[in-house]
Amino acid sequence: MTSGGKSYTRDPDGLSCLSCQVKCLCLTAGLPLKEMAELNDIVRPAVTLDKHETFATQGAAFDSLYAVRTGSLKQVVVTGSDEHLVTALWLPGELIGLDAISQKVHPGSLVALENTTVCEIPYYKLDELCGRSAEVRRRIQCCLSQEMHDERLSLHLLLHRTAEVRLACFLMDISERFRLRGYSPHHFRLAMSRRDIASYLGLTPETVGRMLVKYQQENLLFSRRCEFRILDPERMKRLADASGRRQRLCS
Amino acid sequence: MTSGGKSYTRDPDGLSCLSCQVKCLCLTAGLPLKEMAELNDIVRPAVTLDKHETFATQGAAFDSLYAVRTGSLKQVVVTGSDEHLVTALWLPGELIGLDAISQKVHPGSLVALENTTVCEIPYYKLDELCGRSAEVRRRIQCCLSQEMHDERLSLHLLLHRTAEVRLACFLMDISERFRLRGYSPHHFRLAMSRRDIASYLGLTPETVGRMLVKYQQENLLFSRRCEFRILDPERMKRLADASGRRQRLCS
DNA sequence: CGACCCATTGAGAGCATTCAACGCGTGTGG
DNA sequence: CCACACGCGTTGAATGCTCTCAATGGGTCG
């Protein structure tokens, strides 16, 4: 299945960016009304995806960015040795495809974790708009720079962390992202399987399960299937912010 | 020490981009002559840094990108719990500061690993040039996108790897980067301490040392202090490309 | 020459993986 | 409508990798 081979269901009414719930977080964030309107003109009507639907295959040509309107998606990269790695997770208001601009090819498959809608932003039109608007140009560069920074820091941190702390970091990250989107930070649905979470964190599904049980025993967290409830946010945050493996002294 | 508090030695002759050894890799790569000349006009004369000199402190205001002309640098991030993390490494022709654009602040300290020269590219001038030149605009976006992609993939891979494979991945990455720069890919100097390498890879210096000894015993690599010599590139590459921990079956 | 940092080596402990087995829920086909 | 297969999640036991801690030697800089 290639990205051009299928026509997706599109929202006929094409809800505008101006009325979008997540406009404050999306590409439109902080833009003046004029630029927001121009951006709105180039955004195509939202695409509807079913749970588990792949809408861009690894290696497929890149020609659009996508903004998540509702639902969530993961990026899956298949390595040379046939490993399946989950390398990214997107929630409403987040921008998909920034890592494909350089090579003009999607570095991984994009898979909906649940029923999901995404707005398509044709890249050549966005680039043209960048030429006309310094605001939009800066906004794009900020998105790119911010995401690079966040990933660099959090992944380098994870490399030094035990499974217990890794998972806590992950959950607090998700929690914060939900909070920013106006959802409850302490009670959310995360449509990732244990296997997906494990792959994303560089652990095994068994270890992820065991850690969730441990949190439960310590009254830190309640989890069942996709439902997560952070019972003690303070202690959970302390756990996530705790330094490296064991209690090594700082040099 | 703040970034504005010290005046650095600058190359008075200000070698131009046009004659630079690494122009094919730097920001200038692939640009038409006209754009390269315009870029050259905004680049300030190269700054000379001594070994171990810090030339931007974590939290310092960001107002310029830097391109490495000769030498190498690391980024060091101090976390809330006083850990020192090495989160990036730059070689000649690479661009420093892309992760600071969004927040207008350097997320980590920039430290020269050896005697080093860097070209300063004032960001506000570059941004202005982006408005005038679609070529430069795309070039910057490509740098940002490529770096995000590379880090996302390689760090997620590292999360799943044993120390032995992690270090092999790192060395092959460095090797490839030297090769692209016209240096020997099999015999290079890497001015990072064992501690720096360990921090970068999420390991301990002891483990890094033990793995280097192991490579040595297997006639894969010779290393002494900063000198690295890859004796069996083929096997080293196979080791780096080997899948996750142990020989787990692919699902 | 001495202090200090870095690199190396050894021993022991701890943590995450591997492998195996089981229960559960879902979706499919009879 | 039910039986069944399948994938997912859970639990247990054992292996082994990497960390921690400690001690030593070598290099560098004052």
Image (tube, coloured by chain):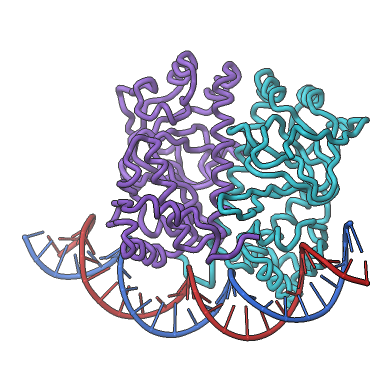
Chain colours: A purple, B cyan, C red, D blue
Q: Is residue A131 left or right of residue B2?
A: left
Up-down relation of residue B196 to residue A67 (above or below) = below
Up-down relation of residue A132 to residue B93 (above or below) = above
Q: Residue furthest top?
A: A34
Report x, y in % for residue D28.
88, 61
Q: Say which quadrant the C terminus of chain A sits in.
A: bottom right
**Residue at 65% across, 58% down:** B199
Report x, y in % for residue B160.
53, 62
Between A105 and B138, which is closer to the camera in this rendering? B138
Residue A144, picture quadrant: top right
Between A9 and B147, which is closer to the camera in this rendering? B147
Report x, y in % for residue B162.
58, 67
Residue B1, picture quadrant: top right
Up-down relation of residue A26 to residue B218 (above or below) = above
Between B18 and B118, which is closer to the camera in this rendering? B118
Up-down relation of residue B7 to residue A169 (above or below) = above
Q: Using the rendered image of the protein, determine whether residue A8 is visible from the camera's viewpoint.
A: no
Q: Is residue C26 left or right of residue A35?
A: left
Q: Using the rendered image of the protein, determine whether residue B180 is visible from the camera's viewpoint.
A: yes
Q: Say which quadrant the N terminus of chain A sits in.
A: top left
Report x, y in % for residue B206.
68, 70
